Image: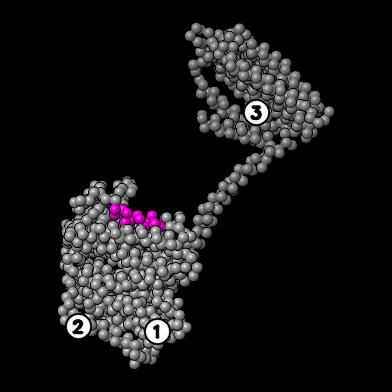
Amino acid sequence: MSGLTDPHAAPSLLPWLILFLPLLSSVLITLFAQKRPMLAALLALAAVWSAFGIAASYLPPVLAGHGEWSLHDSVTWLAADGFIFHYGYLIDGLSLIMLLVVTGVGGLIHVYSIGYLKGDPGMARFFACLSLFMFSMLGIVLADNFFQIFIHWELVGVSSYLLIGYYWRKLSAAEASNKAFLTNRVGDFGFLIGILMLAFATKNLLPPGTGFGDFRAMAAIVGDPAWLATPAFTVAGRWTLTNQAFLWIAGALTFMGVMGKSAQFPLHVWLPDAMEGPTPVSALIHAATMVAAGVFLLARIFFVYLPSETSLSIVAGIGAFTAFFAATIATTQNDIKRILAFSTLSQLGYMVMAMGLRGVDVAMFHLTTHAFFKALLFLGAGSVIHAVHTNDIRQMGGLLRKLPVTGVTFLIGTLALCGVPPLSGFWSKDGILHLSMHPPAYAHSWLITVLPTLTAVLTSYYMFRLVFLTFFGQPRDHHAYEHAHESPFTMVAPMVVLCVLAIVGGQLVGSPETLEAFRAVTRPAGVPEFEPVHADPATIRHALTIFVLGAGAAWLAFGRRLVNPDAIAKLPGVRQLHALFSNRWYVDDVYGWIVRNVQQNVARGCDLFDRWIVIGLFVNGTAWTTRASGALVARYQTGSVRAYAMLFLAGVAALLALVL
Amino acid sequence: MGALLFWGAGAAMVLFTLLTVSSRNPVYSAIWMILSFAATAGLFVLLDAHLIAVVEVLVYAGAIMVLFLFVIMLINLRAEEHEGLRLNPLAILAAATFLALVTRALQDLGPAVGSAPNALQGSPAVVAETLFSRYAVAFETVSVLLLAAILGTVVLSRRSHER
Amino acid sequence: MIGLQHWLGLSAVVFTLGLCGVMMRRNVILVMMSIEIMLNAANLALVAFNKHMLPGPDGAVAPDGEVFVFFTIAVAAAEVAVALVIAMLLFRRLDTVNVDDVANLRW
């Protein structure tokens, strides 16, 4: 069953190829190319770039479609009692922009990986996992119903687990991949309940033959104001839950999935540890694509959130807090990848907050520009690590002279991240900041109006701390410095491409017409129009003020060394703050305490129950009972013929008595 | 006349059976049993089952009991002190219960359909006619059974290694 | 008048006597004799039933009961033969004909 609005396309096989070429690549690599890393790389690259090409072919109709164009097809996977599960694709503006980002940035990172992992014995396995990840992620982007998106949601978690745990022989990497998967599972639990609630609430109104959780059908139902007022169900004949209330609960639960995948507080704990994976993984999954899946989901199912101000407030609040929280921690980190990881957390917080403030377009815009410059920053970090063989910025310094291309691109990426005009970050980030300073009525709180700006200052500070300590000044580890050299072409070229995108991406994507074209077909009516940031003096002044405050402080402390940061860190109030931030606000410790004391005790209780009652009573007890009753009856087997004869007689007499 | 014969032969049968079961000497038990079979044969004649009566005497009294006597002599069975009917209360109770139940079953019979005697033709001709027509297969099977019994007896009683 | 109940009652009494013999005698030969008594009583009952059957359409009574008795007698003969051989073998082996001494098939 296909719904086409594109006049000259037959029910097309091409979108299926986008999805299944990476899967095919992964399978082929696993079966045939495990010992031939270059072949594996070739297969993976071919799959990803073909997918990019196919996706790009849909760009013209999307750009001309004003957010109304879509391409859709699906097959019935499972038709069970009353439920039909579909598996299909939905290409509209929203999914197309994500497709281009995922396959484009992903493709560049595939190229980078060839240089980064050269000589590593598991390189073929890496590409197989990378292709698997591409399949999973593209499935999320292309999904047209909740069932499919949930499956791929989990698949992405699995791929992430495999990739974070790439260096599985290292204990910290294995633990980090476990942590990522388990934290995601907690989020997915809420997600699943939310999906079920939504399906339950809409199931009687779906047109017959619609798949379970079909987005467009549900968007149509949920958008109806009459539906919102009808009661969902009544408890004990007295308390009634209207659909609207039901919706916000479902929305909050579904948001748990977003929290897990996009690492919002309090399910953020896995992202910093996920830096144990190779740098291309960090760039692809934990900067550009997988963590953006949460934001994408919010855009796709925004119809769940729009009717309810409560759920929007929750989303915005958590996003704003996460952004601030992560930025404070980033100021104290010394591992180059960890700083970038917390920076990602912070930017994701911005995106989620923007969603909560009904700025769907600007959030997706920031997602796109962030993919460009954050991937660039991670690749640059990987280049640095590759050169000096350490992640610790305290042992770097003056690398700009030795790694010029890396240094310059990294610097440009940083400027983009800090929102310096006219780079891409300025357009998207300032769009969000503008939204946060003039929020809708339900979100008027200092959490929204003040924190994001403060966070932006902190962002400039910690990023330039990173830049100054790494690329400028005197090298602190001379041995490493001597041996440092620029990275090979396969690593540098993607960085340059991303750098260009980071510069022009803003104007490229940020016009209202383009953003309107990239809208979701499931977008509800009532989302306010995108207000583009104008390059007027007031806005530019605002952005530059933030930048100067933050970068200036970093320059004073780490650039020119006019202020001693260690001395400041020892001051009475600052010391406690520093401890709080560098211990990640002790959230991980709290979780560890909960796991050790609560979960383990619950597990011990369950173990006791299992051992004594299930095994002891039921299993062994049944065996004991059988044996005991058997022994009881066996006492009659005396071997004596006369006894047997009497028993026969007794039996016959009993039968006779019964019959008579 | 028939009733008198019935009571007489019946009492005799019961008496001889009692003596069989309670006798201390196995040979005496065998003799009493032969007499019991004789009484049974008489009862069969009363029932107009002439062939069966004769077969009873021939096979039961003549062959089976002779077999019993042979075996008693072969294994040199003597009359032992602790022989005889040792009255076991539980067994008596069980037997009495059984008898009571069966009697109860008999009472329910009442003036049933077949309670009037018929003119049973128990001559060999009549029996043979039914035997060899309707029950031919069973007849052949029983002959095979007898063959198996013979073989079994021969095989089992061979002394394998002692001569 | 001697009716079916009398015959069956007689058969039952003899059967019970044989039952007592099986339960209460120690000698294996005697036990087998008691079994024969029981079989005999059953034969009596069969013939009594036959005598009280309804006649067939041609007026004659089918001698099915007698045929049945014929067969049981044959089978009893076969069974006694083999059983006595087994008893003899038992005696040769264990030097006893006491049923209580052959309680090997026990738990």
Disc 2 or disc 3, which is closer to the eye?
2
Disc 1 or disc 3, which is closer to the eye?
1
Distance from Cα at disc 1 to Cα at disc 2: 31 Å
Mark 2 nearby-residue class (10 Å; few <14, some 14–19, many ≥20):
few
- Give the number of the disc on residue A541: 2
Identify the residue at the far right of this view: B163
To which residue does mark 3 refer? C19
Distance from Cα at disc 1 to Cα at disc 3: 112 Å
To which residue does mark 1 refer? A397
Res. A436 image quadrant: bottom left
Q: Which residues are magenta?
A: A14-27
Residue A447: x %, y % from top left:
25, 77
* SS at mark 3 in the image: helix
Q: Amino acid at mark 2?
A: Arg
Q: Is residue C72 visible?
A: yes
Res. A227 image quadrant: bottom left
Q: Amino acid at mark 3?
A: Leu
Q: Amino acid at mark 1?
A: Gly
N-terminal-most mark, 1 or 2: 1
Residue B15: x %, y % from top left:
69, 21
